[in-house]
Image: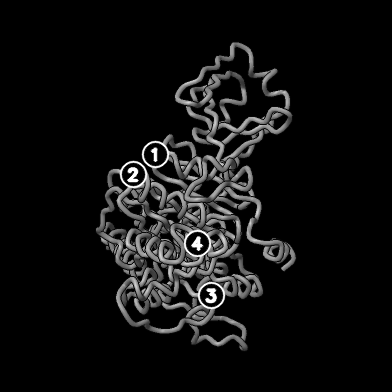
Amino acid sequence: MATRKKAVTPPPTKLFVLDTNVLMHDPTSLYRFEEHDIFVPIMTLEELDNNKKGMSEVARNARQASRTMDEVVSTCEHHIEQGIPLAVPSRGLAAGRLYLQTEAIDARLPASVPTAKADNQILAVVMHLKDRRADRHVILVSKDINMRIKARALGLEAQDYFNDKVLEDSDLLFTGMRELPPDFWDTHGRDMQSWKEGGRTYYKVRGPMCAELFVNELVFQEGEKPLYATVKQKEGPVAVFESLIDFTHQKNNVWGIVARNREQNFALNLLMNPDIDFVSLLGQAGTGKTLMTLAAGLTQVLETKRYAEIIMTRVTVPVGEDIGFLPGTEEEKMAPWMGALEDNLDVLNGSPEDGGGYGGEWGRAATRDLIRTRIKVKSLNFMRGRTFLNKFLIIDEAQNLTSKQMKTLITRAGPGTKVVCLGNIAQIDTPYLTEGSSGLTYVVDRFKGWSHSGHITLQRGERSRLADYAAEAL
């Protein structure tokens, strides 16, 4: 007689307990746990309430989180203790339930742990749930590393909030360029078409590798006859390559600047291309990001008159202690943050040894004044509601922006505006931001493959042998 198989019960969904910093970091996090259930302790609501005042990003997020929670709770006020289904308020994003702490929980923490602290009260709730709901997998979700360590020390499960991470590993970030394998032309050269148009050479190739390429990705092949080109079009297994302008040659200099390596040549091609509205340049200190961008901006503002002016902005996150309120106008307040701009303008103006730039000392002073009238320095704080027409917008130190701030900035661009984001994801100064969740990583990942955007990761430092050695050794 055949024995009947026992029906396998699916494992119950997890129960995630949310710490306050998760909701303040991402107010939509309530809807990001898919089929799993969420538990919000009363202490989390208390801390949200304490942080709701003010105009900072954190206070705005706290208010938004409270509003989201109000929307959810108002859909089901009579049976809160049974959990509120999230499917309707989240419009199908989440299928789990939201549980609020509806009863007083007797804290059973070790005697040495102070129960008055909010973090420890949340830990007490997690311990209570673990004992009470033995059938459930109870996990604390927190952005606070110390909170997670304490939870593990008490034998509780804890996780970071990963939903805002674009990438697990920053090494996987799109670099914007790809080396073609040595046998590329053998495998993709069949039925190849080649033609010249407007001083550029075009190659139409077909093969399996074409499907992996992105539009505006830079492809290269070193050797006796090196090839440097950009992917102009891509449709399935067919791609069209366009040869680059050689900015390493003095005749193609941009405001006196020539590219010193392959990546800089790629970057200048992106910066000088009128069809590309959004450029992101990543690279460590001294790779020439700001210098090349300013040179390209000045050329297109003062010489070709493609843009009306350059607007430069950056996040004002100090590396050391803050120096308090600064006197003066918006431009004057931003001046200490714009040392990089002044340093690069000195280079672009030419030094006295070069024969004095344009017409000696007087010429250089006049040129500097002309340039300064065409470069506006703006603070991020006053960007909401603005629209920039025909501007060359440079966002410096963009790694310190959150993805939300980045969206606010890039959506300021009106017709004829080009946006350039510069940054180094190894130098993040904003709390709670990591290489994986930085706004710069976010835009690089989301914009790849769009026909009007380009990205390049600069590898080689060109500042000095001292700076290069320091970047590696320190």
In the rendered structure, which amino acid carries the disc numbered 1? Pro
Sooner in the amino-acid sequence: mark 4 or mark 1: 1
Q: Do the residues bearing badges 3 and 2 touch, measured as CB atoms within 8 Å?
A: no
Q: According to the image, label 2 marks what residue? A: 306
- Residue 356's disc is 4
In this view, 28 is above or below 126:
above
Tell me where residue 196 appears, x and y as whole percent.
Answer: 50, 20
Tell me where residue 228 appears, x and y as whole percent.
Answer: 60, 33
Front residue of this view, candidates 87 and 230: 230
Mark 2 secondary-structure assignment = loop
In the rendered structure, which amino acid carries the disc numbered 3? Val
Q: Is residue 388 visible?
A: yes
Q: According to the image, label 3 marks what residue? A: 319
Residue at 67% across, 62% down:
464
Cα–Cα gap, marks 3 and 2 = 36 Å
In this view, 337 is above or below 214:
below
Sooner in the amino-acid sequence: mark 1 or mark 3: 1
Q: According to the image, label 1 marks what residue? A: 274
In the rendered structure, which amino acid carries the disc numbered 4? Gly
Q: Residues within 10 Å of mark 1 (few under 14, many from 20)?
A: some
Tell me where residue 299 appears, x and y as whole percent.
Answer: 41, 48
In the rendered structure, which amino acid carries the disc numbered 2? Arg
Cα–Cα gap, marks 2 and 1 = 8 Å
Cα–Cα gap, marks 4 and 1 = 32 Å
Sooner in the amino-acid sequence: mark 3 or mark 2: 2
